[in-house]
Image (cartoon, rainbow, N blue to C red):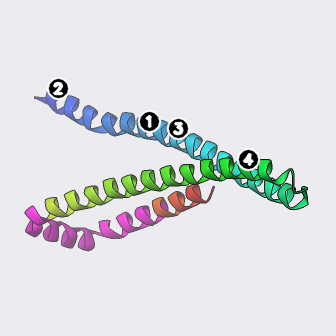
Amino acid sequence: MKKILIFVLCVGVLSPVALAKDTVALQGNKQAIASAEKSAFQARRKQIRQLLKKYKKASESEKPAIKAQLAQVVGEHVDAQLVYMKEHIAAERANLDNWEKKIQEDEKNLEAVKAKRVEDLLSGEAQKKQKAAKKAWKKQMKAVKK
């Protein structure tokens, strides 16, 4: 019986550690992709500005060629923005689905949830959870600014 209890406790403690490692790796990969997308976005904006300056200074015979280049770069830029917006919407929908699932779970056990929150408030656990959540939120906002 003790061996089973120890095994269950070890699995319960080690599972979040393994999951955290996978989560950190995924976040690092997402940040690398986001950084590459941001660099490409900035490069296209710079190229658009350069083509605009070049167009204004160009002679009438050169303007159609520059305009064609500008149209191509702007087209790529708009396409990339649309892809980004669609991905952002999909991520937000997934986030909303998770919130809805949590609400449905809480509604099933509403009395237990209320009792747990009362116990958390009385034991001081609620303040600890609030501080941890605030710290995590600040860390997340700091990562987003980068």
Q: Earlier in the sequence, mark 3 or mark 4?
A: 3
Element marked by disc 4: helix
Marks 1, 3: nearer the viewer = 3
Say which of 63 and 135 sits in front.
Answer: 63
Inspect the image, locate mark 4, and give the three-letter code of the amino acid beneath it.
Gln
Instruction: Check disc 2 and give the amino acid type.
Output: Lys
Q: Is residue 104 magenta?
A: no
Q: In the displayed image of the protein, which residue is found farthest to the front?
A: 61
Image x and y of residue 52, in percent: 80, 59
> Which residue carries the number 4 mark?
69
Residue 50 falls in image quadrant = bottom right
Residue at point 19%, 73% (across, down): 118
Task: Please name the residue that numbered disc 3 is placed on.
Answer: 29
Dot 4 crowding, Cα within 10 Å, few <14, some 14–19, many 20+: some
User: Mark 2 — residue?
Assistant: 3
Image location (x, y in percent) of residue 107: 12, 66
Q: Tell me whether the residue at label 1 lies in contact with that at label 3, contact meaning CB atoms closer than 8 angstroms.
A: no
- Residue 15 x %, y %: 31, 35
Q: Is residue 66 left or right of residue 39?
A: right
- Cα–Cα gap, marks 3 and 4: 33 Å
The residue wearing badge 1 is: 21
Q: Main secondary structure of the magenta part?
A: helix
